[in-house]
Amino acid sequence: MRKDILTNSEVYHVMNKSIAGFKIFQSEKDFLHMRNLIRYYTSAGVRQKYSQFVRDVNIHKDDIEEEINKHLLQKEKTVQIICYCLMPTHFHVVIKQLQDHGIEKFMSDVSNAYTRHVNIKIERNGPLWVGRFQSVLVDNDDYLTHLTRYIHLNPVSAGLVKKASGWPNSSFLEYVNRDKVRFPVCDYSGFISFSEKQYEKFTNDHADYQKELTRIKALCLE
């Protein structure tokens, strides 16, 4: 059990990374698989592993996202995903706990399922993550808004894309063009007060500054 107890109705910045900088997401299929796991395991009372759910549905893989939507309609949620970003070696999630031990169970289910996916795919054994996830309480709305920007700019700071909109493996497009996202992961209603255009400008205007901070931090660590 974790020493720090996560509280219902509170919001947390949760993150984890791979062992020794191992590239855990190596293809768009890997990213999609992780997004599907995140969506599936937000449900309360999930007794069926995702792999078994996919086998039982017995449909073409291209339709699995729609089946997850149907699954979600039938279930209460144990957590609410507010923001996320999947990076090649780590991931960030901003998440609200709705039920007791919800975040801990969600992170365990998602992390274990993705470890099985990778181990089967590349024929390896053993753990994938450095350990238990890290969590930081997000205790005010202003902090939350700036945190989502920081998370969405991670791919830009890492030099993977020039703009946050160029990275499909985060919730940024859900924030700035939600109608075009067929299977959204997040529910940030009640948390972000900006319009889509305002949020896009708020994020893009800070990109160069955050990138420079990242560069300075890397130099200090050398």
Image (cartoon, rainbow, N blue to C red):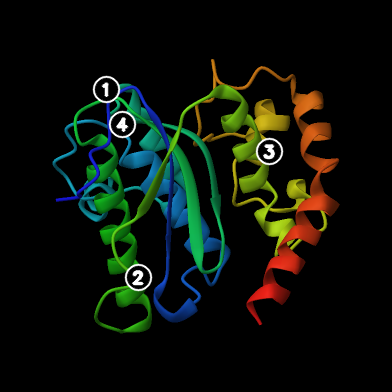
Residue at mark 3 to residue at mark 2: CA–CA distance? 29 Å
**Considering only order in the chain, which callout, 3 or 4, is on the residue closer to the N terminus?**
4
Query: Are dots 4 and 3 in contact, CB under 8 Å?
Result: no
Q: Residue at x 26, y 60 (%)?
A: 112
Q: Which mark is residue 76?
A: 1
Query: Are dots 3 and 2 in contact, CB under 8 Å?
Result: no
- SS for callout 4: helix
- SS for callout 1: loop
In the image, 60 versus 220, the foreground residue is 220
Q: Which residue is mark 4?
A: 71
- SS for callout 2: loop
Kind of residue at disc 1: Glu
Q: Position of residue 204 (x, y in %)?
A: 82, 42
For residue 167, above or below residue 65: below
In the image, 174 versus 211, the foreground residue is 211
Kind of residue at disc 4: His
